[in-house]
Image (cartoon, rainbow, N blue to C red):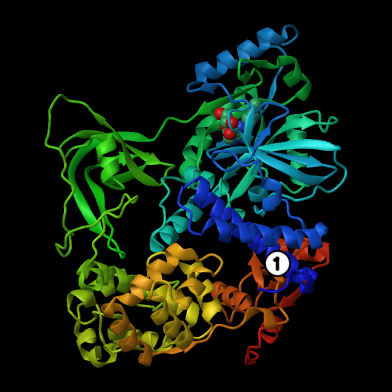
Amino acid sequence: MTDVTTLTEAEAAAELARLAAEIAHHDRLYHTHDAPEITDAAYDALRQRNAAIEARFPTLVRADSPTRRVGAATATGFAKLRHRVPMLSLDNAFAPEDFTEFTARARRFLGPPFLGNTTALAFVAEPKIDGLSVSITYENGALLHAATRGDGEEGEDVTANIRTIKSIPQTLPAPYPARIEIRGEVFMTKADFLALNTAQEAAGDKIFANPRNAAAGGLRQLDATITATRPLSMFAYAMGEASEPVAETHWHWLQTLARWGFAVNPLSKRIAETEAEAFQAELGRNRAGLPYDIDGVVYKIDDLALQRRLGFVGRAPRWAIAWKFPAEQATTTLLDILIQVGRTGANTPVAALAPVNVGGVLVSRATLHNEDEIARLGVRIGDTVTLQRAGDVIPQIVAVIPDGIDRPKFVFPTTCAACATPLARAPGEIVWRCPNGLACPAQVEERLIHFCSRLAFDIEGMGEKTVREFHALGWIKTPADIFRLKSRQPEIAALEGWGTLSADNLIRAIDTRRRVPLARFIYALGIRRIGEQNAKLLARHYTSYENWRAQMALAVQIGAEARSDLGAIIGIGPAIATELAEFFAEPHNTAALDDLVPQLTIEPAEAPAATALAGKIIVFTGSLVSLTRPEAKAMAENLGARVTDSVSKKTDLVVLGTDAGSKARKAAELGVATVDEAGWREIAGLPPLAG
Ligand code: IVH
């Protein structure tokens, strides 16, 4: 370890960031999971090193520094923050009468000239985002701290986490009040939620039930570097404490928020009282097509002076109401409980349902998650169940409708649905797994599908259906077989729906993928918990396949130096190290690897720090002609740069494709350097385009 006295400032900053993340990780294991992975002495050593570096570089002390958190951590690990202005909730309306009653009550309270319907009341209608509310305080234009709602009086200090969300400004452009609290809803889009769950599943990690849970889970991470990897956004919509008045109407407040750089929901609209019902109906119709979940519309009286006069009753304002959409539920019969076998052997129960329409979508399958969920619901085959499209995405069974019939309890199988090997449930896990690995045909098939998938070898023409078909025909048993398919070209051409041309194309597509970057290769192996991110970490650490393979062979030994080196990689840790060691301890796996590797050219990972782009923040915008977006992104990351989505003052370079729009303008406005595609190819060391 480098002597603290010889560290440069840049090295110190990097190490403090790493230590903050690492110590937070161990805190979480210790406090939240009661499962420490390192000894107390090793933990103390980390803290001492952190303190020593901070003592030498006092200006580098981070907001999330472990020294700042001492004593502040609570049972759940987050410090508490008291809201200076309570975060209250809203009364609900479910029908037009409820809305009329709400406005009548406000008019009664205000008295003349609002009593009776002669003086108009203007409203702002805003989609009610289904996320979690947060309150962010800015002092002298700089983000000071942020808290979750908690019980409305006191929330959790999520400052470090909020700082990682790109759509939340770190500083406000002037003019601004000396102190201002901004409130909004943190959420995840439906598409990001689905992608996250796919990645989580691939890595053997927790699956979220809906976008709301995924957003809450992503934000409430003691290790804010995890939050940074989750695609979170926020719509700002309310004001907490303000040291001076900012606007006279809510509508102008929203515009101020937008000017400060917050995302304000674009569907928000200033409306007359008489327009509410039509707005509600229209948004209700469009709801399913929105990229994020909403559960109703919030109607707020626009005039802030009137809001102040109306005040609060109990825990809700008199000046706003949440008009909820009807829940998208339906009733149907549970026909059967099927077991699906995943890539890592998880035997997952799935409900087979009599098809039913839920909020415009025909549903015949619903997840039952695991054995415990079946017990919790008390659901049995033949029962009538209430079904819900949770967060409008994954259908879920929410309850059983009692009919007095005592049907037999579902007995969770003790053997794998695919290969009949006895299932195992690890202590502390809720999932039953088949331990048969590559000898289980379902796991083999799922691994082959994963191997060919977009983020892995990305073989065009080897989609799920083709892999299943070729596997069923016995043509592919291991990944290496895919690269030997050439010999079956005539047989492929003879398959129904194929022909010579398609077969030729497939063989060509496979050949183009013989060259593969190390990170993709590692990811493609489908090792449990080795998702895209961890594969990149491993590739960067070991740089070449040969080195990685040799080190993994050594890491199989508990206590070996290679094992502790592996576990010490930031972001990997001992649990994932064990997973890798188990993979390499299995002769099936190493045999498959040794068969596969001679078919390929595995490109070593580049050492990131050595390039001119190291540490730079790059944004790609518009469409590129010679590269796909993921290729361009991977290239930039290999050169040590960080790729983000939005242009800010911190952006170092914007690569402009064709049709680059608002981001190009923003770059020009902020004076950020830009290059076109040809310029980017030059920077990235690619040959120039012909013509
Ligand atoms: S205004 C004093 N506006 O709904 C009321 N809330 O049921 C301040 N929510 O806790 C809230 N979208 O988490 C407001 N456009 C919006 C909202 C919104 C979602 C949530 C928020 C609040 C809950 C109340």
Can you see residue 522? yes
Identify the residue position indicated by label 1 in the image. Answer: 14
What secondary structure is marked by label 1?
Answer: helix
Residue at the far front in the pictured view: 41
**Could you say which quadrant of the image residue 86 lies in?**
top right
Give the quarter of the image for residue 546.
Answer: bottom left
Q: Residue at x 46, y 58 (%)?
A: 195
Q: Please state which of residues 354 and 311 is positioned toward the viewer in this rendering.
A: 311
**622 on left or right of 173:** left
Q: Quadrant of the C terminus?
A: bottom right
Q: Is mark 1 within 8 Å of ligand 1?
A: no
The residue at 34%/71% (across/down) is: 582
Q: Quadrant of the N terminus?
A: bottom right
Q: Quadrant of residue 311?
A: top right
Q: Quadrant of ligand 1?
A: top right
> Left of 571 or right of it: where is 390?
left
The image shows residue 104, relative to residue 463, as above or below, that is: above
The location of residue 88, given as percent across then percent down, is 62, 25
Q: Measuring 23% from the left and 84% from the top, which residue is drawn there?
A: 492
Q: Is residue 291 above or below residue 680?
A: above
**Amino acid type of the residue tagged 1 in the rendering:** Ala
Left/right placement of residue 480 relative to residue 406 reads right
